Image (cartoon, rainbow, N blue to C red):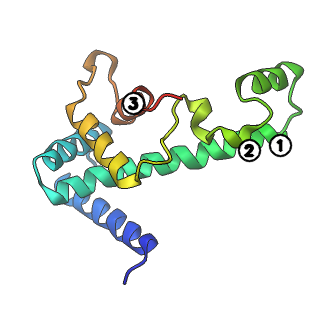
Amino acid sequence: MPSLRGLNAALLIAFGGAMSVLLPQGASAQEHQAEVVRSCVAGQDGDAVAMALCSSYIEGFLDGALVTDTAIVNNISSGKGGAEASDFMTRAYQTRVGSSRGVLPATYLAEFCLPADLPRSSLVERLAKLLASHRFDTAKRETVADALYDEIKRSFPC
């Protein structure tokens, strides 16, 4: 029975391989982003391969957010970061997060809180559906990452 880590690695390899087949070498960032959105849309229509591509993007986004946000909160609370925290920074952190940061999720400072009782697969499905139906603001050159982040903040506020 394959491990979850092995399965994630296989999905990432499949995602990269599928993207390289779908897009020519040297494709622009906009073309890659458009393919992610197309995958999310096709995934909603039952295309399992497309849904795997869409889900892989969302999983990577969530993992990146959780890792970096956790590191930021830990660095702030431990005083790391190269310089001593100013009185203002200390007061702002205590006002915003409080002294018992263990109660708050790491993503609190990023303005979203993922529900602990929602399985990750359900979360990814929900975000894929939101991303598939998102109306991109082409005038602002909104990226897929921007859209996903906005959808997460709107759907899962703290």
Q: Is residue 1 left or right of residue 114?
A: left
**Disc 2 crowd, CA 10 A, few/some/many (<14, 14-19, 20+):** some
**Disc 3 crowd, CA 10 A, few/some/many (<14, 14-19, 20+):** some
Q: Is residue 78 visible?
A: yes
Q: Where's residue 141, x and y in %?
A: 32, 23
Q: Where's residue 17, x and y in %?
A: 27, 64
Given residues 134 and 123, the one toward you in this image is 123
Q: Which residue matches tag 1?
A: 78
Instruction: Tell me the number on the disc at residue 74.
Output: 2
The answer to whether 58 is drawn above or below residue 4 in the figure is above
Q: Are marks 1 and 3 in contact (CB under 8 Å)?
A: no
> Which residue does the image show at 22% across and 39% down from the upper left?
34
* Label 2 to label 1: alpha-carbon separation: 6 Å
Q: Are marks 2 and 1 in contact (CB under 8 Å)?
A: yes
The answer to whether 47 is drawn above or below residue 31 in the figure is below
> Which residue does the image show at 28% across and 66% down from the upper left?
14
Q: Which residue matches tag 3?
A: 155
* Label 2 to label 3: alpha-carbon separation: 25 Å
- In this rendering, the count of numbered labels is 3
Given residues 98 and 47, the one toward you in this image is 98
Query: Counting residues from the N terminus, which is met first, the one under dot 2 or under dot 3?
Result: 2
Q: Amino acid at mark 2?
A: Asn
Q: Amino acid at mark 1?
A: Ser
Q: Amino acid at mark 3?
A: Ser
Q: Secondary structure at mark 1?
A: helix
Q: Where's residue 53, x and y in %?
A: 26, 55
The residue at the far top in this view is: 139
Instruction: Tell me the number on the disc at residue 25.
Output: none
